[in-house]
Image (cartoon, helix red, strand yellow):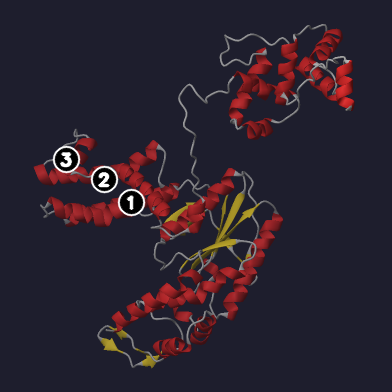
Amino acid sequence: MSKIFESIIHKRLFHQIKNLISPSQHGFIPKRSTATNLFCLTNKIISSFQIGSQLDVIYTDFSKAFDSIDFGILLNKLHGLGFHVNLTDWLHSYLCNRSLYVYFNNAVSREFSGTSGVPQGSNLGPLLFILFINDLTSVFKCSECLLFADDLKLFSSMNSNLDAVLLQSDLDCLFKWCTVNKLHLNIEKCSILSCTRKSQPLNHVYKINDLVLSRSDSVTDLGIIFDTKLDFSQQNYSMVSKAYRRLGILKRKTKEFSSEIALKVLYYAHVRSSLEYCSIIWDPIYRNKIEIIERIQNNFLRYLLYKKNGIYLQDVSSSYLRHMFNIPSLCSRRDVSCVLFFYKVINGSIDCTDILSAINFAVPARSLRNQGSFPNVYSRFKIIGRLECGRTQLEVSEELGIAQSVISRLWQRFQDDGNVSTCYSTGRPRVTTPNEDRYLAVTAKRNRRSTVSDLSRQLSSATGTTVSRQTVYRRLGHIGLYARRPVRCVPLTATHCRLRLA
């Protein structure tokens, strides 16, 4: 009866305060999990790798966090969140007026009252702990953090020693918060992981309460082993070794089993589940690592075939065995898991703003194979003209809406042979050189009253190159200039003069 009452209170309470919980908290929150927590961290590490930076991650450890919650501090925080006084009084009775005893080896201790801690194994205990630790994220000013219940990690990008000093200041704020809230850090278990691909990383000495934190090359974070290079080699080795041990136990304990369904259920529960935990984080891309993981299931498939036929057949392909027993490959299941994770993020089944903001959609315009792959003749001359006038490729790309890679290839081709055609073997070479085009542009800008004929004559006298008026018009049009048309003065007759003066 008490469990039902707690679940009702939890449901009503969480609905009211769910918007107050920090988005950095992933523990005991619907639509969040260890996978979302680790995905956020992995995304931060990859982003730092892409810009050639270093990400320092500090893992902390609270000593008996759930058992150290002070009742008075917790109730004050709940009152500050807007809880009604009747509810806080009920929670006070729920926490303080609780009798405890120890049962061990058929012996029962005398009853005693707890002075701190939230009930573990209850419905309200995890929620009360989350509300107690919720304001911790607000004390960090220079770094980011991720929480899974009491598992806290701080991280910040390291570009200079100043960034390390700022991260150290947040560590000092963390220790101060723990002192005020009567929580204790197990500093010996706190560690530092510097994720970088630099040959000479920045190894700053971090301290908590004047005690130096240890630095590690790998850290187990929520069951996944992270290393400095983020290649998950140690994670794969540890996972495969554990799976082989579990498979060996399964085969030894099921010697008398004959049911194919029972063997499959045991394999799914004890072996395959360990090979698929948070697979979106460590999913390998190299064939040799994929095959090493796949061998575990192939071993089990041959064991199933032995149970069915009574003999081991070594020349049977793995694909045939998967088809026979209707068991998909582990690689395909990981692919499906990644797609499902993406689907859940897009459709709101996973509530994590950091992951959703990291997803970018590229919606290309509809084009045929012979369209849009290269700009037309007019656009190509516009590109060349702007580049010759000193504009950068990025500026031209943004102005004309053409990919910078296309502009780069066009400019390289023009510098090689002066050809701006889509094919190397076709197209007429330009009459003017880049220097002559630049001369036309400068002359037109200096003398705004020059006509196309004037510019053609000036170019001929200066360089000896004779060009048509149409060529000059095109060269100026590529850079946004247009030559003046010659003005012809028509003499006015006496009638015109009389009408204008009337």
Residue hosting label 1: 275
Q: How far apart are marks 3 and 1 (CA)?
A: 22 Å
Please say if 348 is above or below 458.
below
Can residue 433 be spotted in the picture?
Answer: no
* Residue 387 image position (x, y, % from top left): 71, 25
Q: Name the residue under label 2.
A: 297
254 and 422: which is toward the camera:
422
Q: Nearer the viewer, residue 17 or 95?
A: 17
Tell me what residue is drawn at x 13 percent, y 50 percent. Answer: 260
Instruction: Give the amino acid at mark 2.
Output: Gln
Q: Earlier in the sequence, mark 2 or mark 3?
A: 2
Q: Quadrant of the N terminus?
A: bottom left
* Residue 360 placement (x, y as % from top left): 50, 46
Q: Do the residues labelled 2 and 1 touch (CB within 8 Å)?
A: yes
Q: Neighbour class for label 2 at 10 Å: few (<14), some, many (≥20)?
A: many
Q: Is residue 365 above or below residue 66?
A: above
Element on which disc 2 rests:
helix
Q: Which of marks 2 and 3 is in front?
A: 3
Q: Is residue 213 visible?
A: yes
At 52% across and 26% down in the image, what residue appears? 372
Residue in the picture at 63% in, 8% down: 428
SS for callout 1: helix
Q: In which image quadrant can residue 289 be found? A: top left
10 Å crowding of disc 1: few (<14), some (14-19), many (20+): many
Read off the residue under disc 3.
324
